[in-house]
Amino acid sequence: MHGQMVRSVPYDHTASIEASCLSNPMIPLYSGGVIKNSEFNVGLTDWTVPWGVQATVNSSSSGNKFAEARTVGQPSRTVYQTVQMQPNTHYSLSAWLQVSAGTANVKAVIRTPDGQFVAASATVAKSGCWSMIKGGMTSYSSGQGQLYFEADAAVVIWVDSVALQPFTFDEWDAHRQQSAGKARRSAAVRVVARGGRPDGEPVANATVTVELVRPGFPFGNAMTREILDNPAYEQWFTSRFTVATFENEMKWYSTEWSQGHEDYRVPDAMLALADRHGIRVRGHNVFWDDQSTQMNWVKSLGLDELKAAMDKRLRSVVSRYGGGKVIGWDVVNENLHWSFYEGKLGPDASPAIYHQVGQIDGETPLFMNEFNTVEQPVDMAAMASKYVAKMNQIRSFPGNGGLKLAVGLESHFGGTPNIPFMRATLDTLAQLKLPIWLTEIDIANGTNQAQHLEEVLREGYGHPNVDGMVMWAAWHATGCYVMCLTDNEFKNLAVGDVVDKLIAEWRTHPVAATTDADGVVEIDLVHGEYNVTVTHPSLVSPAVRTLTVDASTSIPENAIDISCLRDPMKPLYNGGIIQNGEFNSGLMGWSTHRDIKAGVSSSPSGNKFAVVQRTDSPSGAADAAVPSRSVYQKIQLQSDTHYSLSAWLQVSAGAAHVKAFVKTPNGERVVAGSVSAQSGCWSMLKGGMTAYSSGPGRIFFESDAPVDIWVDSVSMQPFTFDEWDAHRQQSASKARRSTVRVVARDANGAPMANATMIIELLRVGFPFGNTLTKEILDLPEYEKWFTSRFSVATFENEMKWYSTEWTQNNEDYRVADAMLKLAQKYNIKVRGHNVFWDDQNSQMKWVTPLNLNQLKAAMQKRLKSVVTRYAGKVIHWDVVNENLHFNFFETKLGPNASPMIYNQVGQLDHNAILFMNEFNTLEQPGDPNPVPSKYVAKMKQIQSYPGNSGLKLGVGLESHFSTPNIPYMRSALDTLAQLKLPMWLTEVDVVKGPNQVKYLEQVLREGYAHPSVNGMIMWAAWHAKGCYVMCLTDNSFKNLPVGTLVDKLIAEWKTHKTAATTDADGAIELDLPHGDYNLTVSHPSLGTNAAVHAMTVDAASSASEHLINIKV
């Protein structure tokens, strides 16, 4: 539609493998994409029955509908759908298939507008259950195409949940970049410089230089023996690659061409050269299953002789290069296409060989290495479903359960790579949960060789489940196998230029930063090993340390400085998309509003910053009616992108509330953050916003106070939605899960091997709850619904002053007491909400007319009554609710009313955490009252009141959202985290609307993932007459969409009952969400008895080798 932006559909990596053959198919990806009636719910509407095919729509016993097609003769075909195809478009295809009897190879075929028949994927379909097919193809022309499925056997084909989703080339590349950013980088790696003294004081203003020593993602090439005698070859290879595969030199025919005459001198020398340069080597290969690669003497051996020769070869090569000298073994190369050893030894030849290799070298990953699995959808021998079946055969062989197996995909591409098929196949194989490498990448020679190689390499690098890549482009003086990177002078050819460009792009170049007052710098780094050099005037010599950055290091922007500094810190993300963010080049890249005087000034230390003077009236006085504004910068905003914004601000006099504005392409002025800026020092503003359309925008700062605004270190960093979600997932995993090593020991302390441990979660570690109303006392359905879900509760109104003493001196705690008793029955923790509420409108009529002494007496009675009654029974107190927005008690008792009340509550209840509880701190950057800087100031006022230094204080953030500004939410949490206090989202809800479920999921996931958030409670209490804003269920306690979302997250954040078997050391390693567990240990030595032990998993459990010894 004219004038309307089309939002890109995120790529869906969902796939299913052979082991997941289902009784009913899953719903179609992308809701079917361009496919109409994809689930056949309206019969064969929009589908065509071809000549010679009999088709109908059938239903399963559960009511699921699907298409059924039978063909006279072969190949068997299905109904087809005509679709309008677009040029320069990738199509992601998926469907669920079943056949009437046995199994059959079924292809997905797309007839293109120019009449070509393109195989988009293939799978082995079965009878009795549904298998997923996933693939794709690329359309280069527009017009009508047809999609159908075809089997190589005379079977009836069942089809359901068909999807065909188009992606423009730009959209596809954007998804790939997002995925690469998620998989290969860690944002805001936090480096802390501390002094060498026992107290470990932070070193401020130290220079931290970070230099990449070794990239984390392995990228390499095949190597030949010619490198041993060619220094130019050696220099060229070792300056680029971190991993190598010997092209032929480690193969059996290279080391024992003549029977009994082994010669490892060449691979030994090549390995020594690689070791010298820190290059890891893949062991290629132990055996090759291709008949044509066997030596003549091997082919002539009898069965026993062959077994002996194979045993000698296996022990010779694996013991020589095992134990860490190689990083992977291609054990039986290409055993889907070939079967030399199976023909001699039987169908279990490969699994038996893997078993023997694993016995000798149990630490090195053992690869299945095969061609055409990602290259050719039409090669039925190597399709993903058969790869999975072969891997499962290897896994299930007796004794192979503990093998470290891995997926090797050779990636020899002929003509134009089918990139959508490649990605879909990687998605499918990722379900094996094994390391995946592209092991022998090359592209057939042709005019587009360089372009096609770049596509393949970027696709591999961008896929989150690919763990390394090696090209098959070994240099030979007489010419390469298929693809040459250089000429014989080692000058790059076009393909070599592509490789060098990508190597440079995938690395972090040396970067320097200055530590803040806490000795901290935060740096966005690609995964890898780094040298970190710290210099400071206090150091006699530079301090050099090593740093490894990997996926677990990725915590985006969770620590910032909230103090007012003499000089601002460097801009985050080096300014991101902001040009000249430090004003070192004057006002270049910046513009001034009309009638504003702007310039660049310098501090005594030489730091430059922008200064804007307010507009003067004709009389020469500053016009107080005109807002103070800063310079602005024009920026190009991208659709579906979160922006993290930060800057350092100062004002000319006093203090002023300064907002950051982003003017969007549609002219909207979005408040992206605000701060209370001061004169004399610099304050950090941190915030953000989300762009939903592309186009030009502006960033500037504004204050309603008559002050000059100083600006420095401006940064605006874009994150695609996928990148943002990736950071959130990484943070959640680190904050909410731990790997625990559990050891079972017998009465004598000896480890118990092969013991069975059943792990059962008793209580989740992360508190997640909801508000509770008195109606629960009379409704068993409400009770069951609530208590089966939540571990913490807040009473909506029942503990408030107006609920317990509506009439003066007539206290009534019966309802609150009964609700607390019910919660205790189910071990549900309760927050005390609240002691007082600072809102004038929430006071009872008898309170407002009281004089000062009467009010003090009534307050003292209330405070002692409620706190002593529930001390030790509630985990928190909201002490003076919403005391940033409201000030009823301050107007009566003076500005220290809140700190004084906190002091009194703390004297009566030493164990509960005393919370400030406020709205709009996370929700509304435009609300000046509760901005993070003012929240911090209020909390410091409470902390600094005489006698309050030892109080257990907490940060309560109500979180009543309309449309969430997720980047601002994260930045506000970052800022408040610097208080180093417990932080809860206390009253989470989202106003009703078409996006209520989506927005609630965003908020809950953001809170759950932030490492400084310690718990969350929703404000979604059930009432028969309707909820406050957000309802989870109807009046029969059947989930509404919001409730279904909540149940989904609760299930996702739990561990379900699982069992594991201890190894030879009596140990198992478990990746568990934090919480309380029961471990039940059974073993033949225990007979029918089982030992049950309790275990708590929390952040402290994350230490390596965290042992829990169970003496049985």
Image (cartoon, rainbow, N blue to C red):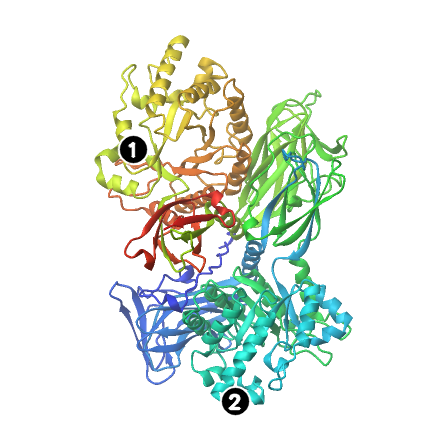
Q: Nearer the viewer, residue 162 or 201?
A: 201
* The one of 326 and 437 positioned closer to us in this rendering: 326
Q: Is residue 400 visible?
A: yes
Q: CA distance from mark 1 to mark 2?
A: 82 Å
Placement of 399 over or under 600, stated as above or below = below
Q: Amino acid at mark 1?
A: Thr
Counting from the top left corner in percent of width and height, residue 723 is at 54, 51
Residue pointed to by mark 2:
301
Where is mark 1, residue-wise? 773
Q: Is residue 618 above or below residue 596?
A: above
Q: Are marks 1 and 2 in contact (CB under 8 Å)?
A: no
Mark 1 residue crowding within 10 angstroms, few (<14) / some (14–19) / many (20+): many
Quarter where residue 499 is shown: bottom right
Q: Residue lying farthest front? A: 748
Q: Secondary structure at mark 2?
A: loop
The residue under the point 61% across, 62% down is 218
The percent position of residue 1013, horizontal first and vertical second, equals 47, 38
Residue 370 shows in the view: no
